[in-house]
């Protein structure tokens, strides 16, 4: 894809089950927003994940929790596109919808290192790179493959300068370290189900919403 001089600033896209959303998600989104000079980061709760088990909380509860989590942070936006679309939440469909709405805005698909290593198993993964950059948020001690499809992709597309994310619509891969917050949504759900407090792992208003609606309680 050729350099285009009339592009908007790039936006970040962070999808997930957010079951529930926690400080690991939020800190990563905010750090990348600031470090990469993004216009915003869209948090997109999926309706039905493709590569993992169905979420415990309903789509409506997960969407509400994300809204509560980011209500005081203008850099982060929630998008209900996948929940409205229903069905399996394929990233390619979401990026296609974004590209139609934002034809001159580079899209930065945010993922972790594990997602990058499994990227060739994603539905129409090669087409994803025609629509977005991959921004890989990694922790210390991460290991990149030396051979295979992902290794070849990195050789072809890895950029050392974040400015490349704003200068092309799609197609680059950029690695960026983020604060390591080893928080597990699964563990949060287990704590709540056992009557224990997960406070300080997720925003207070999200925890209060969970308590108010009995989202993860075992009946």
Image: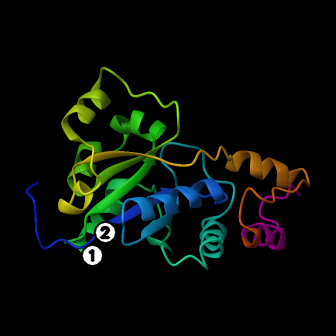
Nearer to me, 136 or 132 = 136
Which image quadrant is residue 105 in? bottom left
**Label 2 crowd (10 A; few <14 / some 14-19 / many >=20):** some
Indicate which disc residue 164 carries: none
| Quarter of the image where the C terminus is located | bottom right
Mark 1, residue position: 101
Mark 2, residue position: 98
Res. 87 visible in picture: yes
Region of the chain picked out in magenta, as a range: 206-219
Gap between marks 2 and 1 measured at Cα: 5 Å
Q: How many labels, in total? A: 2
Indicate whether 95 appears above or below 122. Answer: below
Provide residue 207's location: percent of width, then percent of height.
77, 66
Indicate whether 201 appears above or below 143. Answer: below
| Quarter of the image where the N terminus is located | bottom left
Q: Is-magenta flag for residue 67?
A: no
Provide residue 141's location: percent of width, then percent of height.
52, 30
């Amino acid at each position: 894809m050729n350099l285009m001089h009339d592009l908007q600033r790039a936006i970040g896209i962070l999808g997930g089950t957010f079951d529930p959303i926690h400080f690991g998600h939020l800190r990563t989104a905010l750090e990348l927003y600031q470090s990469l000079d993004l216009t915003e980061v869209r948090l997109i709760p999926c309706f039905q994940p493709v590569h993992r088990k169905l979420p415990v909380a309903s789509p409506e509860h997960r969407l509400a929790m994300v809204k509560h989590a980011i209500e005081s942070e203008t850099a982060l936006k929630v998008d209900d596109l996948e929940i409205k679309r229903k069905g399996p939440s394929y990233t390619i469909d979401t990026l296609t919808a974004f590209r139609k709405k934002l034809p001159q805005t580079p899209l930065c698909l945010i993922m972790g290192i594990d997602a990058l290593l499994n990227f060739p198993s994603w539905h129409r993964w090669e087409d994803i790179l025609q629509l977005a950059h991959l921004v890989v948020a990694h922790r210390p001690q991460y290991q990149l493959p030396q051979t295979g499809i992902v290794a070849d992709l990195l050789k072809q597309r890895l950029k050392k300068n974040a400015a490349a994310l704003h200068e092309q619509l799609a197609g680059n891969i950029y690695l960026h370290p983020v604060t390591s917050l080893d928080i597990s949504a699964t563990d949060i759900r287990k704590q709540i189900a056992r009557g224990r407090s997960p406070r300080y792992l997720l925003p207070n208003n999200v925890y209060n919403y969970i308590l108010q609606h009995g989202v993860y309680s075992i009946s």
